[in-house]
Image: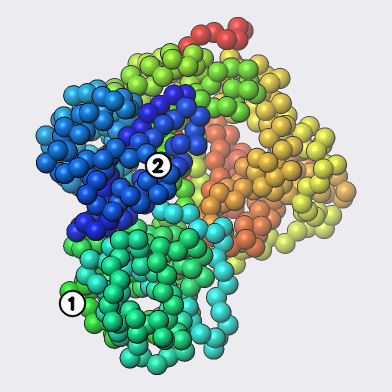
Amino acid sequence: MKKRILFRVDGGRIPEIGMGHVTRCLILARELSSQPGTEVMFLMRGDTDGAAYVEAQGQHVWKIETLAQEDIATLKCLVDFNPDIMVIDSLKIRPDYLTLVKKTGVILILLDYCGEHYDKADFIINPIIQDKNVLYAGYDYMVIPEGPKSRSPSPLPGAPQNVFVSFGGFDKNDMTSRFLKAAAETHVNRNYHVVVGSSYREGSSDIQTAHHSPHVKMYKDPSNFPELLQSSDVAIVSGGLTMYQATAAGIPSLVVSQYPHQQVNATRLEENGAVEYLGSADTVDFQKVIERVGTLCADEDLRRRMSINGRRLLDGRGNSRVASLIGIINRLEWDSAFFNVNIGYLYPKRLRKSIVSFAMKKCEEDRIECLYYLCDCNDPESVQLAEKEGFHFVDIRITFSQDVRSRIAGDPCALPGGLRVRPARGEDKPELCGIASDSYISSRYFFDRHFPQEVCRKFYADWISKSVDGLFDHAVLIAEMNGKLAGYISCRHVSSNYGAIGLVGIAPEFQGQRVGTHLVSAALQWFAERDIPFVHVVTQGRNLAAQRLYQSCGFRSEKLELWYHKWFREHYAH
């Protein structure tokens, strides 16, 4: 599906900005560029080092020579590049600039925007604030660099502690130098990994001194940044993007803010028990910061609590969520090939007229025959627009969640005699496919009579078969009762913080014997062994048996959404 997306962002040695916004847009640009037919362009000030950094990452940049020429350069870029969608990543933007952009007819999306005039954008994504005018708000929409799939184990007691230190890509207040001076005066058996960004200005005598310290190692814009962070026991950071990256990685963090808005962000995380806020750059005493590092390193229980609280807040899926929202609509390659129908997916769960019009235009261009839409049922405008546009309701989607640790600790769910749970093998596939073929008649595919019933049965049989090979879900566990296959459950490693249960199927002769309960318990153990603390599972509103199973296993309902399908022509006649 052909789309052109323009990112308006700045960064580098610019007060109040730094490099966090640029880093986020680069992450999104890479995600979007991987979609067939999508082109990306950056619109940036040419008089800062941010544009050069983006070009070095292989992205195309349209440069604004000076801010006085911003409006003219923007119009020329909009005419020549002719984007479908423009994303502006900034805390504040001139209202007349927003008006200028909207007059061109482009879809306008704002990231992190904290100003007024919300109505000038088609929608706003802000992971920091909760505001009724912001359609997509909260930590679910946090975009952060991805790290390793799991954390490195903490060192044994008595070993040197590893402390990660970074005050952003710019470090406006020269906190790196101040920290290094304090560290040089402290004699402890602790390793400091100090990271500075590409915009950092070197030359301080304190930094030169640090190079001679056996406990301090400095890095400038290192390629192994995520690994350095995740191999640490504690982090000292400012309140920008790295703070959220450390929080998502489960690294207990001490935060010193560079700017007023960072204080607000750090305080909110502190209220959730994920970080400790130590003050602003102009007031903090770094000797006391280092003392607090020692206290935190010695308090294993506190570090564990901070780690789990952070991982609960940031599930690690914000990158794909935000990229999908920005892309608005896409063709589903696998679904289209499987059902032999040209199928699209409309990603924004909260609709507005401009978004619907854009989606319908793209469906016409690509000759989409069926469009999936998952609607936020709490937004009446979205429900009304979907029904007005001819979307047909096909399902209720209920999401349940579970804290793996509480279930494992509270109910080991010992297996009864004659029942065992083991990983599925290739020779199990025929029986698994037989159970899967008849287990999901309450799903939206069966409910939507445009899809032939035999094709729907094959859909789920293929799902479980491919999951045995790790191609859909990553593992399949099966239950055997006295040597007979009684049921199965599939597990997917979604991110370092969250897993998902995919399919659960019970053979008819073993239903009502708590086989499902034992399979769920085994799946939670599978996630726990991989240090995945939280698990989601979704089911249909009409599947009461599945809802009762998950509730009996300690899952709590978290979200309710509505599935709609829109058919542009009668592909299957029934």
Q: Is residue 96 left or right of residue 572?
A: left
Q: Nearer the viewer, mark 1 or mark 2?
A: 2
Q: Secondary structure at mark 2?
A: loop
Image point (44%, 24%), residue name = 2
Q: Which residue bears the numbered disc 2?
A: 59
Where is residue 166? Give x, y as percent.
36, 69
Give the camera-side residue of 136 and 81: 81
Q: Identify the residue at the far right of this view.
A: 483
Give the quadrant of residue 521. bottom right
Q: Is residue 390 left or right of residue 174?
A: right
Residue 562 in view of the camera? no
Q: Amino acid at mark 2?
A: Gln
Q: Which residue bears the numbered disc 1?
A: 283
Of pointers 1 and 2, the one earlier in the residue sequence: 2
As drawn, the label of residue 8 is: none
Image point (35%, 21%), residue name = 358
Q: Is residue 134 left or right of residue 310?
A: left
Image point (16%, 29%), residue name = 100
> Is the C terminus in the top left, top right, bottom left or bottom right quadrant?
top right
